[in-house]
């Protein structure tokens, strides 16, 4: 009877316990291992390659994995060792959102943007309140009050187009920084100019408007680069909430400082805050998230994955004739004009309105005027959140933009018509609160639509539409003064403004689109 001897080890076999075999922790380059395995049904040749990849995550975290390839069956698997793979766990996804890993860079950007937009509007509002004691001191008429209030817009109308083009070329960070530096200087000089002459005052206010004209185009372009599409409306809502809160801050602080310090007090305070803000903005913000030294890899991927075109190219010049040849452009321009018409009427004349119609003192007028702007900040953020949620749920962008803008026009129009019948300052404040709260839905309408139809030329388009809106604001601000002086009432102008809101809503729903046009 034959006896069988144990098989001898092949010369090609490997002793895995040998110190010469490279372990997983070895620094030597891993070799290819060939071995044969006999199966009961078939015999196949397997070739196993072990490799260890180390991937950098968020500047600190690392993940290791062995890659196993089967050349016979075409199978490839990744076997994790140590830490987990990127993005495969809830922890990694939370890291991209900044949960438990510090505040994401894009949230820092929007926080600084919201603060400067608050300062931007507070600097405007100071004059709306300070003009009451100045008018009493110098004996200005209602019509001249309208000229002083509109002088800010004389410079604003020219800087919007130029500022928008500069933002497209140089980015929002640099243009915003120069704007803040210059308008803070103009704010500081305003009381000195008022004491010197009315001509000096009008010149300084025009220069102030020239500097502030770059704020909105800078904000819009910067946020579009720092936020994915499904977060953009919320980011704009947060920034515009700061913008509207600037009204509250200015309307409440200015009367207190006027009575305690004098006319120079509020102007000195807000100009100083602008310089403090610049110290955080210049070193802490970049035009594009890819230029940031502090952003994590996961957050950068999240931002770029959420954009239709995550790469940024220097846009070629878009001729004005081509821009104006499309009806969606005119829908945005008309919407901006209507929004600014109503906005600046309420911003510039509400303290005077409460003083004239209800005979309340300056501090009470400031409180009644501030309440609507505070609720507008909340409703604007709500509009942005709702808009993002609808788009993320699959609703067409065009439909969402039309819904938001319709609320932003029809709601204020109805509220202003009802304001004609208000008999107490409380009722008037409630109606103005409704009007301004609903008008904030425009932020998720035409303001975002500029990035929809012209993503590479949004700054230029914003400048064009903002210039047209500024022209409308000048007419409405001056017109209110003449209407009040001629007719002795605000009712006629409130009715005209309501009709303009309704016509703009119809035009928007017919011609606006959420698709890219340019």
Image (cartoon, rainbow, N blue to C red):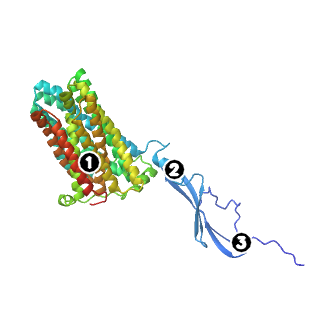
- Please identify the quadrant where the N terminus is shown: bottom right
Mark 3 surroundings within 10 Å by alpha-carbon count, few (fewer than 14), some (14 through 19), many (20 or more) = few
Tally the numbered discs. 3
The Cα atoms of the two marked residues, 1 and 2, are separated by 34 Å
In this orientation, does residue 238 appear? no
Q: Which mark is residue 217?
A: 1
Q: Residue furthest bottom?
A: 1
Foreground of the two, 281 or 41: 41
Q: Which mark is residue 11?
A: 3
Residue 357, given in percent of the width and then of the height, sits at 19, 29
Residue 452, given in percent of the width and then of the height, sits at 31, 55
Q: Is residue 323 above or below residue 160?
A: below
Please state which of the two labelled residues, at mark 3 or mark 1, is closer to the viewer: 1
Q: Is residue 517 above or below residue 353?
A: below
Q: Residue at x 37, y 43 (%)?
A: 382
Circles 1, 2 touching at the beta carbon (< 8 Å): no
Q: Is residue 2 above or below residue 384?
A: below
Residue placed under numbered mark 2 in the picture:
92
Foreground of the two, 70 or 359: 359
Answer with mark 2 or mark 3, whichever residue precedes in sequence. Answer: 3
């Amino acid at each position: 009877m034959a006896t069988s001897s144990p098989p001898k080890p092949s010369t090609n076999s490997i002793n895995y316990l040998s110190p010469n075999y490279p372990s997983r922790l070895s620094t030597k380059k891993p070799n290819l291992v060939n071995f044969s395995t006999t199966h009961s049904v078939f015999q196949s040749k397997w070739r196993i390659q072990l490799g260890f990849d180390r991937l950098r995550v968020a500047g600190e975290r690392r993940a290791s994995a062995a890659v196993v390839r089967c050349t016979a069956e075409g199978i490839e698997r990744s076997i994790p060792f140590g830490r987990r793979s990127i993005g495969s766990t809830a922890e990694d996804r939370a890291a991209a959102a900044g949960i438990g890993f510090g505040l994401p860079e894009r949230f820092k950007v929007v926080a600084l943007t919201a603060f400067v937009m608050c300062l931007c509007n507070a600097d405007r509002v100071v004059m709306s309140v300070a003009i009451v004691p100045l008018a009493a001191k110098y004996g200005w008429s209602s019509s001249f009050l309208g000229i002083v209030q509109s002088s800010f817009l004389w410079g604003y109308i020219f800087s919007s187009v130029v500022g928008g083009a500069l933002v497209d070329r140089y980015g929002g960070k640099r243009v915003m920084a120069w704007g803040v530096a210059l308008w803070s200087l103009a704010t500081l000089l305003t009381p000195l100019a008022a004491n010197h002459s009315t001509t000096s005052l009008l010149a300084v206010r025009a220069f102030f408007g020239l500097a502030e004209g770059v704020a909105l185009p800078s904000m819009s372009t910067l946020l579009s680069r720092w936020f994915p599409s499904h977060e953009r409306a919320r980011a704009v809502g947060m920034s515009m909430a700061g913008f509207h809160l600037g009204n509250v801050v200015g309307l409440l602080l200015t009367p207190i400082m006027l009575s305690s310090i004098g006319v120079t007090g509020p102007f000195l305070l807000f100009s100083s805050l602008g310089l403090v803000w610049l110290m955080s903005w210049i070193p802490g913000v970049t035009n594009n998230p890819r230029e940031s030294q502090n952003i994590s890899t996961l957050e950068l991927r999240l931002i770029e994955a959420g954009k239709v075109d995550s790469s940024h190219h220097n846009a070629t010049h878009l001729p004005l004739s081509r821009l104006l040849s499309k009806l969606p452009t005119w829908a945005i321009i008309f919407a901006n004009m209507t929004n600014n018409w109503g906005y600046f009427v309420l911003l510039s004349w509400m303290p005077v309105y409460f003083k004239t119609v209800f005979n309340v003192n300056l501090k009470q007028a400031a409180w009644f005027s501030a309440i609507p702007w505070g609720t507008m900040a909340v409703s604007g953020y709500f509009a942005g959140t709702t808009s993002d949620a609808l788009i993320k749920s699959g609703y067409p962008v065009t439909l969402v933009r039309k819904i938001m803008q319709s609320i932003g026009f029809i709601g204020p129009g109805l509220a202003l018509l009802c304001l004609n019948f208000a008999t107490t300052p409380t009722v008037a404040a409630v109606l103005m609160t409704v009007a301004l709260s609903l008008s904030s839905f425009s932020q998720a309408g035409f303001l975002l639509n500029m990035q929809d139809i012209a993503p590479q030329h949004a700054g230029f388009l914003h400048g064009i539409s903002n210039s047209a809106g500024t022209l409308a604001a000048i007419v409405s601000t001056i017109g209110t003064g003449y209407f009040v002086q001629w007719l002795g009432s605000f009712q006629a102008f409130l009715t005209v403004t309501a009709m303009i809101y309704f016509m703009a809503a119809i035009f928007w729903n017919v011609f606006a689109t959420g698709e890219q046009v340019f």
